[in-house]
Amino acid sequence: MFTNCSLGHCHIVIAVILWSICVDSRKIRGISLSYKRFYRERKSFLCIDGSKMIPFDQVNDDYCDCMDGSDEPGTAACPNGRFYCTNLGYRSHYIPSSRVNDGICDCCDASDEYRSQTPCQNTCRNLGQRERAEVEGQTRVLGERLRLKQLLIEEGVLTWREKQAQLRDLQRVSDDLQTQLDDLRKEEARRKEEADSLREREIGARDTADNSPTSPYRPESPISVFKELDSNRDGSITVDEVQAKLSPVQDEEHALSEDEAVKSTIWTSMHFEVSSLIKGRRGVPGSLADEDPNIKAAVSAAEKAAADLKRVEDAYETVYMEIRDLREKLSIDYGSEREFLFLHNQCFQLKVYEYIYELCPFSQVTQKSASGEVVSLGKWGSWAGPPENPYCQMRYESGEPCWQGPTRNTMVMLICGTETALRSVKEPSKCQYVMELQTPVSCQPALRQRGIHSEL
Ligand code: MAN
């Protein structure tokens, strides 16, 4: 390079090169836009921590003056200095100043190797493009997962509403049946009453007929006849009493013989017995009264309504318990979304080595060995995530006791994914299991494109 030049000429060239290197290194490099204001060329420079004032030509002179290293952003002189890679087209970041001109390309815009022999290329554009494509892909996937999550939330809300509506319908049907049953029971009672009073009237009419003058020996009613015959009121009728009553005229010719008096007494008491039987029949279940087809129809209608009501009440109870169970398990009243409802009544399996693991959310976890033996790894316990997101972990507890160990427990971690599936099962310590259940309902709209910038 210097072969064709005179010595004086060479001196000038060398001086220019040295000066340009000096100026180059003094050029304020490695600072971000927001820090530029501290490095405006003036007579003096105030260290950014305010600890010291130095002449401005000591900035980037490869000698560390400020405690915070702020006077040497573009050199490796300060041990705590940091160099800002602007990296236009990609992500800006700081590197320790010690890496400046160390022969290794740290900044993708090559700004950290401004005086080294290493030929660094500016790769920021490519990196930025690649990362943007990646982020776009991830955003698309996340968008899809969030869309699925939304569908599951809607499905859950729908299921919940359906269950509530089912409960309301059952309540309504039960109320209607209760009213019907009440009416039928009233009708049954009315018909029985009617039948009873009809019988009363029949008996009354028969008694009147018995007492009529055309049948002098038929008493009006068994009790009154008895009373009349029992003249000494001792509660029994003797032949004498009957003879005295039925032959009032002291006429030997018409007086009853003893035999006639006995027959009459027997007849009276039989009449009394039969009448009492008829009277006692009133309202006795299984008695002749229930054979009345009118009453029988009313009884069976009421019985049918009672059976229907029982069926509906049982169904109501089942749905009511199911809702209560879901409400508690899913913590629906305490912030959980209904998206977890779709997990209810589903089971997920995964084979790991010789075991088939099965997770039935909100119910239980089991482990089936090759021999077919099924062991409980825990029953639904509670949500177990951290307070800020309790619904990202489930605890299943009190499974089968482990031989010479604790009872089996399982922790299920819910992770974001497109499909809902059991992704892994581990046993980090004996009989303590950890599962990963992947599902879109665990996706959060949190992934944000990290600060790629194309302008300063
Ligand atoms: C079975 C399985 C295992 C467990 C051992 C403990 O083999 O349940 O997961 O570690 O029992 O004895």
Image: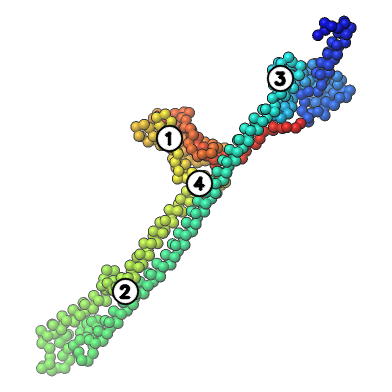
Q: Is residue 81 left or right of residue 446?
A: right
Report the Cα–Cα distance between label 4 and label 3: 56 Å
For residue 240, the mark is none
| Amino acid type shown at disc 4 | Leu
Q: CA distance from mark 4 to mark 2?
A: 52 Å
Quadrant where ligand 1 appears = top left
Q: Earlier in the sequence, mark 1 or mark 2?
A: 2
SS at badge 1: strand
**Kind of element beneath mark 4:** helix
Q: Residue beneath label 4, please? A: 341
State the residue position of label 3.
120
Distance of mark 1 from mark 3, alpha carbons? 53 Å
Q: Nearer the viewer, mark 4 or mark 2?
A: 4
Is 217 above or below relative to 416?
A: below
Q: Residues within 10 Å of mark 1 (few under 14, many from 20)?
A: many
Question: Mark 1 touching mark 2, by CB under 8 A?
Answer: no
Q: Tell me where residue 137 sits by quadrant.
A: top right
Discs 4, 3 touching: Cβ within 8 Å: no
